[in-house]
Image (tube, rainbow, N blue to C red):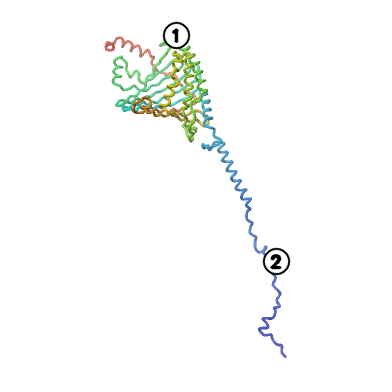
Amino acid sequence: MPDQQPNLEQQINQPSSAPPSVSPPPSYYRESFPTPPAPKSKANLIKIIAGVALVVILGAGTTLAARIWDPLWNPFRPSPDEVIVQMTEKMKEVKTLHSDGNLELNVKNGTGFGIKSNIWTDIDLRDSENLMGANGFDISFAMEGVQFSIGFETKQIEETSYMKINTIPAFPMLQSVFQMIGIDQNQLKDKWIKVDLKKLLGEAYVAKQKEETKKQEVLVEKLKKLIEESTFYSVKTELPDEEIGNKKAYHYIVVLNQNEIKRIVPEILKTLTETGSSTLPFEQVTSNLQEEMDKFFEKIGELNGELWIGKEDSLLYRFKGEKTVEMGKISEGKEGAISLKITTDFSKFNQPIEIESPKEYKNLDEILNPLMINLFTNPMIGK
């Protein structure tokens, strides 16, 4: 009998003879698929941030300490009072300097009156026995409908002075006076005139003046001591740094210490009386002084000024002051105002300054002698 083949149902229900499936070992997956990198640790990230912050802080601190970056809030920045004290000491050491100053005074009371001036100065104090200096003045006056100017220069070399008139006021009346007394303006303008005190006043007078000068030196030393021991102003506001020329400078607004002024003025007057510089009795001079000073400061109010002090050398490079006072506060019933502006720049500290005698000049007697002769001989002048 032939073998019977299992039908389809039997084949499906019959268990398979194939070997059972087996899962691959874990090493299979590790070898087949690369393991992703582990995420950075939070601790490492914090270390990096802290390191960067430390570098920034150290860099900023070094910049502030070295004053490369010097904002007003810099903890390494010296206080304004320290800067001013150091400036005062440094200016005492200055032996030569140049200054340029501008002054403007205006009175507005209906008509109006104004003065503008530019003044430059060279000072040489290297030899205390032979002080030298040079000055230049350009001054203009203005009133309603009238304006005129005058300009001149002076030099002081030991006991000899020189003067030169650069601008002569253009007054027709003045020109007529010059013609009447026999003076040619062209002989005066832009010509140096030598004033020799020994020759003009005699050696006895010069010797007496030297004695007076020694007395004045004693007075100056006493006054200097009084001033050095006083604080005439205090810093009101510290402003951002500025540049004066090519110098970086601190910039302060200072206010005058009125109480200190009231205290020191009587001391100065007392010193003048003791040294014979004032012939008035001290008690007479100071009888109502405090009361008068109180009234004065009450009328003019607070006095402010500005200082620019070098950051590297602690020298004073600029001073500026400005004040306007109503005339009614000064004198009751008056209308208008008085305004004053002053600006002075200082430079060439302890640099060589050449102050030399002019090569061409006229002696003062060359001008005075013809003038005196004309005064006594011109019949028009005596009338």
Residue type (three-letter) at the residue carrying disc 2: Pro
The image position of residue 39, as x and y in percent, is 62, 55
- The residue carrying pointer 2 sits among few (fewer than 14), some (14 to 19) or many (20 or more) residues within 10 Å by Cα, namely few
Query: Vertically, is 49 above or below 349?
Result: below
Q: Quadrant of the N terminus?
A: bottom right
Query: Vertically, is 13 above or below 118?
Result: below
Q: Quadrant of residue 377?
A: top left
Q: Quadrant of residue 24?
A: bottom right
Residue type (three-letter) at the residue carrying disc 1: Ala
> What numbered label is drawn on residue 329?
none
Query: Vertically, is 43 above or below 2?
Result: above
Q: Secondary structure at mark 1?
A: helix
Quick one: 247 or 296, which is closer to the camera?
Answer: 296
Q: Is residue 177 left or right of 80 when viewed as pictured?
A: left
Q: State the residue at coordinates (53%, 32%).
A: 79
The image position of residue 34, as x and y in percent, is 65, 61
Quick one: 219 or 99, which is closer to the camera?
Answer: 219
- The residue carrying pointer 1 sits among few (fewer than 14), some (14 to 19) or many (20 or more) residues within 10 Å by Cα, namely few
The image position of residue 165, as x and y in percent, is 37, 20
- Residue picked out by circle 2: 25
Dot 1 or dot 2, earlier in sequence:
2
Q: CA distance from mark 1 to mark 2?
A: 128 Å
Q: Quadrant of residue 365?
A: top left
Quick one: 307 or 259, which is closer to the camera?
Answer: 259
- Residue picked out by circle 1: 204
The image position of residue 380, as x and y in percent, is 27, 12
Query: Vertically, is 57 above or below 203?
Result: below
Q: Residue placed farthest to the top in the image?
A: 204
